[in-house]
Image (cartoon, helix red, strand yellow):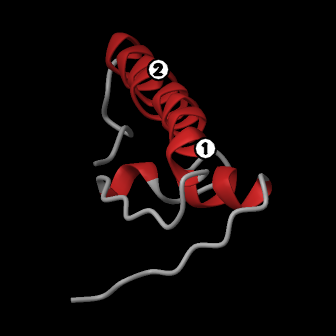
Amino acid sequence: MSLDASTAAECALNDRFVKQGIFARNRRMVNRLRTDYAHGNLFVAVGALHLPGQQGLVSLLRGRGYDMSPIFF
């Protein structure tokens, strides 16, 4: 999705969604997964928007020392 032709209000809404709907949710998920992961191996499925970037789940979990492997079907 391109924000090039978006209004200031649309850009602000998108920014809020990314910060609260993706990044903040990623941090909550990481905190919850730590508890579940302590019990052993764990399989987690999430939407693609939660995976990439420095604030994505992969980066956040690896930054806490967790080892992850992708599974392809």
Residue 70 picture quarter: bottom left
Question: Height in image: 21 above or below 60?
Answer: above
Q: In this rendered view, identify the residue nearer to me: 14 or 51.
A: 51
Mark 2: which secondary structure? helix
Numbered badge on residue 17: none
Residue that lies at the very extreme toward the bottom in this rendered image: 73
Residue named by callout 1: 34
Count up the numbered dots.
2
Residue 48 lies left or right of residue 52; in this view the side is left
- On-image quarter of the C terminus: bottom left
Residue that lies at the very extreme toward the left in this rendered image: 73
Q: In this rendered view, identify the residue nearer to me: 73 or 10.
A: 73
Residue at left offset 60%, top offset 33%: 31
Residue named by callout 2: 20
Residue 36 lies left or right of residue 38; in this view the side is left
Question: Height in image: 14 above or below 40?
Answer: above
Residue that lies at the very extreme toward the top in this rendered image: 9
Residue at left offset 51%, top offset 34%: 32
Residue 68 picture quarter: bottom right
Task: Identify which amino acid the numbered label 2 is placed on.
Answer: Gln
